[in-house]
Image: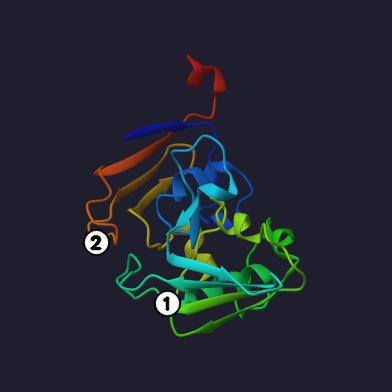
Amino acid sequence: LRIYQYDSPASMSIHEEALNSAQNPMMAVFNNLVLFRQDVPQNRMDTIVPDLATKWSWNTDMTELTFQLRRGVSWHDDKPFTAADVKCTWDLILGNGTEKLRANPRKAWYRNLESVSTKGDTVTFHLKRPQPAFIALLASGYSPVYPCHVSPQAMRQHPIGTGPFKFVSYNPNEAIKLARNAQYWKPGRPYLDGIEWTIIQNRSTAIL
C-alpha cells in the first residue's frame, strides 16, 4: 500500500513528535493499551476498545485505573512485552525515568498522573484527583507503549513496536517504509505485505 503525506518528520518517535507526520505512519508499528475504534468516524468514550490491555477498571473514587495486560505479545525484536514496558513509557513521559525524551509535547496531558505501578500482568495509573476521561488520553494515536529495553535515541531512528507492521527505513523528504509483522499477535493480521509512505513536500505537486 502506498500513501502520500506532505511533511517529513524529524524522527520516528511518536512521543517526541507533535505532528501527524510521525504519528500517522508509526501507529502501524505500535500498539496502545486501548484504542479508539478506527472504523468509527468520531472518537467517543464508548468506542474505546482493548489493544495491549484486555480489560480495565476504576477504583471507587476514580483515581486509580487498572489494566489487565494481554499475554503472549512480543516486541519486533522478539523480546516479551511486559507490564514494566507500560510503566517505563509513562515514567519517560513524566520525566521520572533514567532516560529522557529530547522533546515531550504531551507531558501536559498527564499533569494529573501521579505515578504508574505494576503487579504481575496488571498496570495501575494513579491519579492525583478523579479524571474519568483519562482513559481517552490513552486511546489516542499519540499514546503508544514503548519498550523498556530500547533507548529514546534508538526509537527516533529505528523504532521497535508490537504492532502489525515493522519499521524498515526512513529517508527524509522521500519515504517511510514498513513491512508486515508475520508474528503479529492478532491472528490473520495484517492483511497487507507492507506500507510505503511517500513524502511530497511541495503541496501543489501533491494536489496535482
Left-right relation of 50 to 96: left
Q: Nearer the viewer, residue 186 or 144?
A: 186
**Measured from the top left, where is residue 49 in percent x and y?**
46, 54
On screen, 142 above or below 25? below
Please give the name of the residue rendered at 24% of the width and 56% of the height, measured from the top-left corner. Answer: 187
| Secondary element at tag 2 | loop
Number of the label disc, if any, that sits on residue 183 = 2
Indicate the position of residue 90 as horizontal and vertical percent values.
Answer: 60, 70
Q: Which of marks 1 and 2 is nearer the N terminus?
A: 1
Above or below for 120 versus 55 = below
The residue that mark 1 highlights is 82
The residue drawn where x is 54% and y is 41% is: 21
Question: Height in image: 124 above or below 44?
Answer: below
Give the position of the N terminus as an image quadrant: top left
Task: State which quadrant residue 75 falls in.
Answer: bottom left
Q: Which of 189 and 63 is in front in this view?
A: 63
Residue 28 visible in the displayed image: yes
**Residue kind at label 1, given as amino acid type:** Thr
Total residue callouts: 2
Neighbours of disc 2 within 10 Å: few (<14), some (14-19), many (20+): some
Instruction: Answer whether labels 1 and 2 touch (C-beta < 8 Å).
Output: no
